[in-house]
Every structure is written in structure tokens, then in C-alpha cells.
Image (cartoon, rainbow, N blue to C red):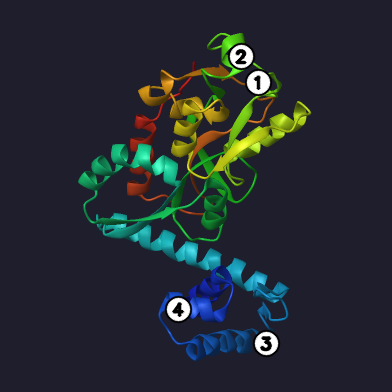
Amino acid sequence: MNLKHASYIMAILEAGSITAAAKKLLISQPSLSQTVKAVEDELGLPIFDRHAKRLTLTYAGQRYVESMREIMTAERNLLSEIAEMKNDHRATLRIGISAQRSISLLPQILPAFLARYPLVTVELKELPSVRLEELLSKGGCDVAFITTASKQNDLEYRLLENEQIVLMASKQTAISRRIGQGTEIELSEAREENFVNLTSGHSVRTIQNHLAQLCQFEPRVLLELFNMEAAKLVTAQLNAVMVCPYGYIQGDTRVETLTKCYPLRCHGFERHFYFCYRKKLRLSSYMRDLFDIARSKCQYHTM
């Protein structure tokens, strides 16, 4: 089995087509097609279902990719262990993180980390948390900072920070005049308000959807935004409310003076901030230190 061939097959799977993968890999399409043929000839079975619009794996292809990922992880673990035996920390560390978290966390942790490990090259993968879990499982990054609920899958979730989910309401809203700051509420208390929503895919939006369904109402959406920072600032200026982690509000005078916050009864629909990696990955010393540095900078934000 050829590890380079395997990495090309995974690139095709991620890109969805041989043409797109060839452009990303900076190689010719015929050359990449020959790689696929070589792997299929070696296995004696097709690895891609070519009848679908987007290339998908056959069962043989799934088993090939699963096995090759394990082999690649084993190789990375061995090289990491040998590098530590030689006290050699030259490496590339692929870190996944959401764009919102990168703004607040990276300036706090990267200076200390890179001062300790100047020979480690950091590559960032900025994606929403839900996509980071998928990327991590597929070996697209080494570690990731993910805001989610811990799951039973092939990932390890090491807790960095618990989060409190609140309803942030502009002082122009009826709920802010009716209920005092800091009062714990059901989301249904805001059923008559205008909502500024985060787009689908945000874990906060997922929690909001669950709570609205539980409370049996459909939020009246004024605006939907991808960027939490923009959504927060817009909500503060409008006659609107927003579901948001309290940690993103605390200390931000741009919104604190214009809004009131209410802890939400989440009924088990919670999210927390984790340092994640594949269970079979051996954490190198610099990965373990990255976790320790991040944990020292995180805290529980609560009202």
C-alpha cells in the first residue's frame, strides 16, 4: 500500500471530483486518474462510485480509506515518538478552530506556544465546529478547538471551558422592560420578540432550534448572520434578541450597556469548549503543552 496514493484518494474524496482535487494538489488530472486506477488495480475492486454527481466511496473504498487512515496515524505516532527521543520538535501542527474562537483565543495562546516551540510550524483550519469534527475524523487536522457537546465517536474531547447560554435582549425590547437582568428564563418568554439568528451549522443555533421546538413556537426572525460578532452588535442596536454564549458578551462594553442578559433553561441542550483529537493519535509533547496553555487561558463565564 502506498501512503502517497492514499493521501491523493482522500484529497479526491474531500474535493468531490478528480478535477477539483487535481487543481488543489497542483498535479494533472490524467496523473491523478492513473493513481486511482493503480489503487483499484491493486485492490481488484473499484473504490469510487462514479454514477453519483459527486464521487462517493464504494464499500471497498470505505474500507481502504479507513485502513489507510489508521496506517497514516500509526506512522505519525511513530515519527512523533522518535522525534521526542531525539529532542527534535521540528513539525507541522494543523490546528482546527472556528473563526469566532480564533479571534479571542489565538492571540492568548500562540505567542506562548511558539516561544516554547519555535520549530513547530502552525497551520490553521478555520471552519465552523460541526465541520471541524468531520475534518478531524478524516485526518484533515491534528487537533481542534471545538465548541460542541461531547459525543461517542472516534474523537477524544478534553474539556477546556463550560459555557452558559443566555438570551441577550436589546433594552428597546418588551422583555427587557418586563424582566430583570440575570433572571433565568425559558426561551418562550421571548416568543413575541424579533430574533437575530446565527446561520444553521452554528452549535448555538442548534440549541436555539431545540429550545424553540421544546417551547412550541417559531422565532420571528428579523435577520440571520454567520458572524457572531456582527450578530451581537446588530442585536444591541435593534429592537431584537439573540441566543448567545455569555462569554462572548461579558466585558464587551459595546453591547453590555445596550442590552440585558437572561440565562436560558437549556434542558440538557448545552455546549462546551473542548480540545479534540483522534483517539488513536499519540499526543506529542507540544500538543500536550498546547492543551495546557489553552486550559490556563479559559474560564467559566457565568452570570
**Mark 3 or 1, closer to the camera:** 1
**Mark 3 or 4, closer to the camera:** 4
| Spot occupied by residue 266 in the image (x, y as percentages of width and height) | 65, 25
Cα separation, mark 2 vs mark 1, equals: 7 Å
**With respect to residue 128, does 273 lie above or below?**
above
| Spot occupied by residue 219 in the image (x, y as percentages of width and height) | 69, 32
| Amino acid at circle 1 | Arg
Q: Quadrant of residue 229?
A: top left
**Residue beneath disc 3:** 44
| Amino acid at circle 4 | Lys
Cα separation, mark 3 vs mark 4, equals: 27 Å
**Residue beneath disc 4:** 23
Cα separation, mark 3 vs mark 2, equals: 62 Å
| Amino acid at circle 3 | Gly
**Residue beneath disc 2:** 184
Instruction: Please name the residue shown 39% across and 33% down the image.
Output: 295
Q: Earlier in the sequence, mark 1 or mark 4?
A: 4
Give the camera-side residue of 255 and 12: 255
**Residue beneath disc 1:** 265
| Spot occupied by residue 48 in the image (x, y as percentages of width and height) | 66, 78
Instruction: Please name the residue shown 31% across and 39% down the image.
Output: 109
Cα separation, mark 4 vs mark 2, equals: 52 Å
Mark 2: give few (<14), some (14-19) or many (20+) Cα within 10 Å.
some
Mark 1: give few (<14), some (14-19) or many (20+) Cα within 10 Å.
some
Instruction: Please name the residue shown 48% across and 54% down the image.
Output: 281
**With respect to residue 193, does 203 lie above or below?**
below
Q: Earlier in the sequence, mark 3 or mark 4?
A: 4
Q: Earlier in the sequence, mark 2 or mark 1?
A: 2
Mark 3: give few (<14), some (14-19) or many (20+) Cα within 10 Å.
few
Contact (Cβ within 8 Å) of mark 2 with mark 1: yes
| Amino acid at circle 2 | Glu
